[in-house]
Image (tube, rainbow, N blue to C red):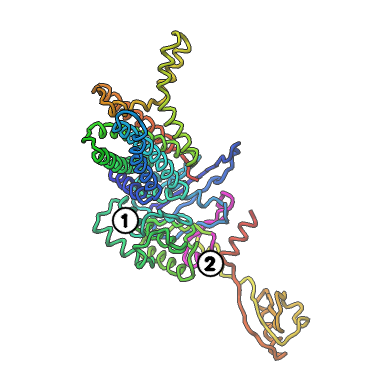
Amino acid sequence: MAAVLTVKNLRKSFAPGFIPRRKEILKGVSLEVEPGEIFGYLGPNGAGKTTTLKCLLGLVFPDSGILTLFGRPHLSLSARQRLGYLPESPYFYDHLTAFEFLDFTARLFGLKKEERRKRISALLERVGLADAGRTPLRKFSRGMLQRAGLAQALVNDPDLLILDEPLGGLDPIGRKELRDIILEQKRQGKTVFLCSHILQDIEMICDRVAILVAGRIMSSGRLRDLVSEKIEFTEIEISGLKQEELAGLGESLAGQEGRILLKVVGEDKVDDVLSLVLSRKGRVHSLLPRSLTLEDLFLDTVKSS
Amino acid sequence: MRRIGVIALNTFREAVRDRILYLLLFFAGATILLSRLLSLLTVGDRLKVIMDVGLAALSFFGALMAILIGTSLVHKEIDKKTIYTLLSKPLRRIEFLLGKFLGLAVTLLVLLSLMTVFFQAYVLLLGGGMNGRIFLAALYIFLEMVLLTAVAVLFSTFSTPILASLFSLSFFLIGHFSRGLLTLIRKIPAGFSRTGLRILYLILPDLENFNLKTEAVHGLPLPAAWLLTSAAYGLFYTLFILTLAVIIFRRRDFT
């Protein structure tokens, strides 16, 4: 199947300030998003994630590069008709209520009155704002605005949902609900493009990721290819033993109230530690095998660049 | 066209829910009422003084409203980044800008109509009759407001609200004094400087074209040809300014 979104060799530079000095933000970014996948576009602050999105949405004009949405030029209105976008820290019209705001956006898609009414009520329910439909947006908290933003992104039942830092301002419950909504989109065969620097919640749901650092994609691919299942080391928390006795078995990370947190590399060493604890009548409080996480990969990539 | 309408409706809604407009409306009303006080202090036809002050109030506060909402509402969309969401929808930039302009024009039409009706009612109360010329003068004030709105929208596509307001206010002032150049042109001998001044006069706006106050107040003749030329002048100038605004807005990066 053809890619839903393609970016080929995208370059963009800005020349801000009174005496302009060109600053290159994107230095040849290329990526493809397949239909039905959840794609994570990751990178530290200032890497150029939002600039990539702005190019895609036609908010800024790239210096060079080819951008397509659903196989059409990215500025075509028919491609926009199938797109939903949640901007970073969204702010919406103070003078409108949540319902009026969603109605306004739905009108831009040309939805009929009856359909608008039905869909908006369902959406407000879905994002947890059912009771706030008649409240002016100026009285909304940051988390509520984020929810309203998500609702407007979904108002046209988009085939491609682009989310820029969607977790901002959300409490743990909100994060879980957002995750559920993203997964529900995937179940319906829709594509989700997720832009973020918060990794914990993304790790669990992304099919593929690309890591952008300083305007270049440093690493991309299936998550399970990038992040191996191999155990890097094991953390063991024990008590009833002295520090000296453990010398040579592992690195002591911390010790409090007689407990020792030990970083042990290799499974043989883990067995050695456990038998030593048994023989000294000590206690094992916890044993955690650590594998490479997305966060480690992310930090490694950023550091190595 | 449908999408322009949707943007226009939202702009109208935003404008009429803005309290600052009601403050201006209040002051305009107060000025019209106080014209009675001024008329007591003057010799001559008191009704004419009231008409004069009233129409001047319509013109002044109308211009103020046009500049104020014209510069703030477009810039606000960019500043608060609401435009990000809008432009990601199936909406062309030109549709956004025209929708914004249309919404502002409708808002001003409503406000000016309110002020005009109030003014005519006041004139009736003070013993004057129904005067069609008040409405004609108001119509031309409206044409001027529309042009000023286009100018305000143009400036706010690339500068801050304060600068845009200053620029638009300068446009308003220059527009009302540029006719002085004509007198100067008549007084100096033909030659380089006269041609230069003539070109300058052509470039600068002449908002006196929309000033029917004297004719309306004193019942002077209003030739149809003049009325038509003035209306066409307003229309084309507005279109010209809007085209400039669209050209700038089309290629702008929203960072």
Question: Residue A103: which disc?
Answer: 1
Examine the rendered structure and indicate whether residue A282 appears above or below residue B152: below
Q: Which residues are magenta?
A: A197-221
The answer to whether one can see residue B146 in this image is no
- Quadrant occupied by the N terminus of chain B: top left
Say left or right for A281 vs B137.
right
Residue A289 within the magenta-colored segment of the rendering = no
Q: Earlier in the sequence, mark 2 or mark 1?
A: 1
Indicate the secondary structure of the residue bearing disc 1: helix
Disc 1 marks a residue whose amino acid type is: Asp
Residue A207 within the magenta-colored segment of the rendering = yes
Callout 1 environment at 10 Å: few (<14), some (14 to 19), or many (20+)? Answer: some
- Mark 2 — residue? A200
The answer to whether one can see residue A174 in this image is yes
Do the numbered discs 2 and 1 sit on residues whose CB atoms are within 8 Å? no
Rendered residue at 49%/70% (across/down): A172
Indicate the secondary structure of the residue bearing disc 2: helix
